[in-house]
Amino acid sequence: MRLFVAINLPDDVRHAIVRAAEPLRQPGLPVKWVEAAGIHLTLKFLGEVDAGREPAVRAALADACAPARRFQLPIAGFGAFPTPARPRVVWVGCEPVPALELLQHGVETAFATLGFPVEGRPFRPHLTLGRAKRDVRTRVPGLADVLSRLSFTAAVAVESVELMESRLSPAGAQYAVRHRVPLEAT
């Protein structure tokens, strides 16, 4: 199974993000866009995991979430990694509020005890909207201008963290919740 840990958003927020990002889809950019149902905040990508390890993975997620409390996640701003001129990922940003950073650190720590490598890059919370097509090696003119004209803000109540399964297909990734850990009320 291909697994990751994520915060999922309410459907109305996902659809609002897609509507706000619609101008990005117009210029025919060489980007494969994520469907609204696939928009989420990844806390930790686990990769291929043997099905027999799922109970330990679920337990690690519960341990990681035990000290966490429900919180508000501010969402705003559009951008691209590594740069808008040469994007690999087009995203909408999430503010790295302390509760989110503590939760993500807890997830990293809990999964490190199971042998999952700790992410070497700093945590930059974002919601992926699209990925540059693999054959794109050139600059993408005009993306920075389009991104600068977009606007979206929301605050989402984070009430749970999910263990997700990703099934890859030519039509794109399909995601399914394998396990949900509710966060305690504040």
Image (cartoon, rainbow, N blue to C red):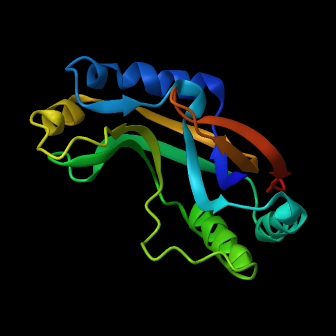
Above/below status of 106 relative to 160: below
Residue 72, x across and y down, in percent:
62, 48
Observer-nearest of 172 and 33: 172
Residue 62 picture quarter: bottom right
Residue 128, x across and y down, in percent:
45, 42
Residue 137 in sight in this render:
yes
Residue 41, x across and y down, in percent:
56, 48
Q: Is residue 120 left or right of residue 37?
A: left
Observer-nearest of 74 and 40: 40
The residue that appears at 62% across and 63% down in the rendered structure is: 99
Q: Is residue 80 left or right of residue 122?
A: left
Residue 40, x across and y down, in percent:
57, 42
Above/below status of 86 relative to 52: above
Residue 110 picture quarter: bottom right
Residue 107 picture quarter: bottom right
Residue 58 in sight in this render:
no
The residue that appears at 57% across and 33% down in the rendered structure is: 169
The residue that appears at 42% across and 72% down in the rendered structure is: 121
Observer-nearest of 3 and 163: 3
Observer-nearest of 105 and 177: 177
The residue that appears at 14% across and 38% down in the rendered structure is: 140
Above/below status of 56 relative to 171: below
Q: Is residue 162 left or right of residue 75?
A: right
Q: Is residue 151 left or right of residue 27?
A: right
| Image quadrant where one finds the C terminus | bottom right
